[in-house]
Image (cartoon, helix red, strand yellow):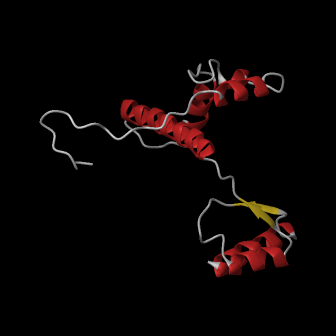
Amino acid sequence: MTKAVEKVLAQFKERFDRHPKAAQFDDGKEFYNVGVKTLLNDHDVHYFSTRTFRKAVLVERFNKTLKTRMWKYFTENKTKVWVDVLPTLVKSYNNSTHRTIGMKPADVNEENKDEVWTGFMDIHWTVFRNPSSKSGITSGWR
């Protein structure tokens, strides 16, 4: 993995005449090892990961919604060309009222962003229990 990181750093240097100041990674072990750490430290690159499941949940939910809308469009229009329709789908998403925040993402601004975030984060994130066995279903079917 270190060679891949070296290649990326070299491309940054070549294209932008400098190395990046920061890099964000997921929690993968391929990014958190001695080789990568040494290489990034040698180039004064600050690296970090956001270790919160909530961030990933939000992005995954957006991805699911976007994919659903894309496939609906593909089916209705008998095409799989997404480049032309993507801006329209994103605009539609941003101008739809979202149940979780109670408003359209396009209506979130500097003045109300903290209120929206606080309201969203106050939602009780449920922990799913293992399903209970019902009559006729054998245990251990998970």
In-front residue for pair 114/1: 114
Q: How many numbered marks does the figure carry?
A: 0
Q: Residue at x 58, y 26 (%)?
A: 92
Residue 60 visible, this angle: yes
Residue 10 visible, this angle: no
Q: Residue at x 69, y 81 (%)?
A: 35
Residue 67, x across and y down, in percent: 47, 39
Residue 126, x across and y down, in percent: 50, 33
Q: Residue at x 63, y 59 (%)?
A: 26
Question: Is residue 11 rendered to the left or right of residue 26?
Answer: right
Residue 111 to residue 70: above or below? above
Residue 8 to residue 95: above or below? below
In-front residue for pair 135/10: 135
Q: Quadrant of residue 110?
A: top right
Q: Check the picture and name the quadrant holding the N terminus.
A: bottom right
Residue 55, x across and y down, in percent: 63, 43
Q: Residue at x 71, y 29 (%)?
A: 117
In-front residue for pair 29/130: 130
Residue 137, x across and y down, in percent: 16, 39
Question: Is residue 1 rendered to the left or right of residue 11?
Answer: left
Q: Quadrant of residue 125?
A: top right
Residue 47 to residue 141: above or below? below
